[in-house]
Amino acid sequence: MGFSVIVLESDPRVAQSLAGMLSSHFHSVHFTRSGDELRERVAKNRPEAVILDMEQSRLTDVSSLRRDFPLLPIVCTHRIPDEEFWLAAMEAGASDVCPTDNVHDVLTSVLRSVATAQSAAA
């Protein structure tokens, strides 16, 4: 694929796992250290998806990204994404919320979200 994804992940172990899984499906995978850096890269690189570690981000970051980049899939990760958090993230504009340590679910969600966004844009 020629697609790119930008990731904000605080846990180096999870970031390494995500890099391995994502690199086999995306042309480029960029990791950022802050919400500001992520926003700059999104504006500059126009990725096909973003993965946001909600341990390092806020729901207002999700809302802001959704407002500024309406078709951008935003998959959030959280250590313990209970139903209340999932609902709040979805209302803020997330495409999905996945447990941080389940990189397979994160990958599946990103791929599904990208396909949905591309269908909507067509």
Image: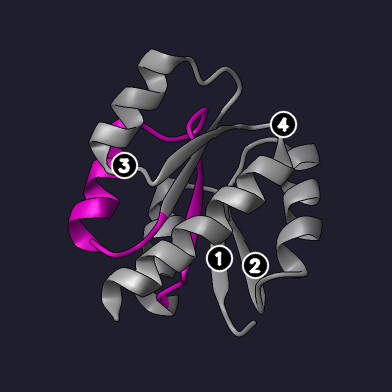
Q: Amino acid at mark 2?
A: Val
Instruction: Identify which residue is drawn at 33% across, 24% down.
Output: 87
Instruction: Identify which residue is drawn at 29% across, 65% down.
Output: 71
The Cα atoms of the two marked residues, 4 and 1, are separated by: 18 Å
Query: Any magenta on residue 48?
Result: yes
Query: Any magenta on residue 3?
Result: no
The Cα atoms of the two marked residues, 2 and 3, are separated by: 20 Å
Instruction: Give percent across and percent down for residue 90.
Output: 32, 35
* Quarter of the rendering containing residue 23: bottom right
Placement of 112 over or under 109, stated as above or below: below
Q: Amino acid at mark 4?
A: Asp
Say which of marks 3 and 4 sits in front.
Answer: 4
Q: Earlier in the sequence, mark 3 or mark 4?
A: 3
Q: Amino acid at mark 3?
A: Asp
Q: Which residues are magenta?
A: 46-73
Say which of marks 3 and 1 sits in front.
Answer: 1
Q: Would you say the residues marked 1 and 2 are in contact, meaning their CB atoms lie under 8 Å apart? A: yes
Q: Earlier in the sequence, mark 3 or mark 1?
A: 1
Instruction: Give percent across and percent down for residue 32.
Output: 56, 55
Q: Quadrant of the N terminus?
A: bottom right
| Residue at the farthest bottom position | 2
The Cα atoms of the two marked residues, 3 and 1, are separated by: 17 Å
Q: Report the residue marked by disc 2.
A: 29
Q: Report the residue marked by disc 3.
A: 61
